[in-house]
Amino acid sequence: MDTEIDWSTYMQQVECFLNGTRDYSQITGATGPIVYPAGHIYVYTLLYWLTDYGHNIYRAQYIFASLYLITLFIVFRLYRQYSMAPPYVLLFMCLTSYRVHSIYVLRLFNDTVAILLLYLSLLSFTSGHKWIRGSILYSLAVSIKMNILLFAPGLFLLYNEYLNTWNVIKNLMICALVQIILAVPFIVTYPISYIKNSFNLGRIFLHKWTVNYRFMSEQIFIHKGFHSILLILHITILFIIFHQRWMNLIKKKIFSFNKNNFDNNEMNEQQQQQQQQQQQKQRQNFHHHDQHPDNGTKQKFGQHILMTMFISNFIGIVFARSLHYQFYIWYYHSLPFLLWTTSNGSSHSMTNICMLGLIELVWNIYPSTIWSSIILHLVHLTILYRLIRWSNIDIVVEMITTKTMTTTTITTGTINNDDNKIK
């Protein structure tokens, strides 16, 4: 069934690349020049060869159906281990969304590949805290589509909560290095063209495709002042939800720095050696606990990581300049997690289901209408209010700051489970 939208454009762009074009402004297709980072080119080059130079769309649909099933498997695993949502929600998730099925199996959008890599990175972060592996997968996802950067504020906060300063820098460098390596063929020839086209934050979206701002005139929709207001709101809500956790981190780092200076001045050489031996023993105990946590602790850590990432992404979606239909999968699988984690028991299940139903209804109305856009904003703002309220009473934050962070500041390193060594 030939139901693709951008597939033919992707294939034309791949052919430009295979023909030797490295100037990003000249890699074009039927709908215009390429606007995605280098990872997108490599993924669709592979698909180009697997689908008889892009002509076998039927085979491509089978490939994307497989990607959908793999994504579901990873999402279900995360939900089974860390979510408070009831099991029947997973059934709704895989059976009820016509729009999501269409995005994966019929439209062949690159969003699907980026989201798969994103969930693989979340699986790495939550399964034994494999930060290096997770950072590589996260950066690969960014290299396919830039929307994955909406998770970046949450990820940066998690880096600072779980890792010491050196390991924060190391993971940030890994993320940057992945981008540089993938972009080498383009940045060594036409660097400005690559950066301008692949990471174009000022790109103007077409009003006719918007799902969330149909009630707004096109003149306001494309106005830079409106975009600036959305950016300010985005940053403000991120600050409101995450600022207390950043304050806790800053206080603990200051306390640890002052304590270490005082201890170093007061202790003689023998006492310092004894303290180092004690710290080494504490690191070994922490490493053993990290490898074999009890189920309750493991679930809280997983919830903490996933909620941080999902909240960061959701805030970005709420204040996005425009949402197109394929953007639905940016947060579709995370919505039940957010709703049931912020609920007060099963009494809110019906409310949660109604909100999911309204969101699903809006995304299946084509073309979007004034009322569908208004409904989407109302539901989004309701969820956002719940997230703000939940963030103020989050017991997971207290657990992290009183237990894990105390241990991390006492020790001089952190655990890197990727190479099974104590750093």
Image (cartoon, helix red, strand yellow):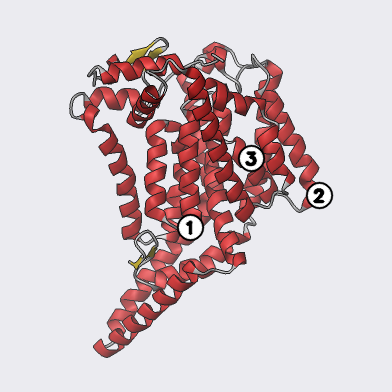
Q: Residue at x 53, y 21 (%)?
A: 107
Residue position marked by numbered label 2 in the rendering: 347
Element class at badge 2: helix
Residue 212 position (above or below residue 285) = above
**Which quarter of the figure has residue 350?**
top right
Q: 10 Å neighbourhood of mark 3: few (<14), some, or many (≥20)? A: some
Comes first in the chain, label 2 or label 3? 3
x, y (%) of residue 290? 48, 67
Q: For the residue marked with disc 3, what is the amino acid? A: Leu
Q: Quadrant of the C terminus?
A: bottom left
Of residues 36 and 89, the one nearer the viewer is 89
Task: Give the mark nearer the N terminus: 3 vs 1.
Answer: 1
Q: Nearer the viewer, mark 1 or mark 2?
A: 2
Q: Who is closer to the viewer here, 331 or 158?
A: 331
For disc 1, the marked residue is: 247
Q: Residue furthest left?
A: 189
User: What amino acid does circle 1 point to?
Assistant: Met
Residue at (57, 37) in percent of width and height: 69
Q: Is residue 230 above or below residue 273?
A: above
Q: What type is the residue that disc 2 sits on?
A: Ser
Front one among 191 and 48: 48
Q: Residue at x 22, y 19 (%)?
A: 20
Q: Is residue 361 left or right of residue 210?
A: right
Of the 4 image quadrants, the one containing the N terminus is top right
Q: Which mark is residue 368?
A: none
Q: Position of residue 418 (x, y in %)?
A: 37, 58
Q: Is residue 245 left or right of residue 284?
A: right
Say whether disc 1 or disc 2 marks the residue closer to the N-terminus: 1
- Per the image, the residue denoted by label 3 is 335
Disc 3 to disc 1, how far (Cα)?
A: 28 Å
Is any part of residue 342 visible from this angle? no
CA neighbours of label 2 inside 10 A, class few (<14), some (14 to 19), many (20+)? few
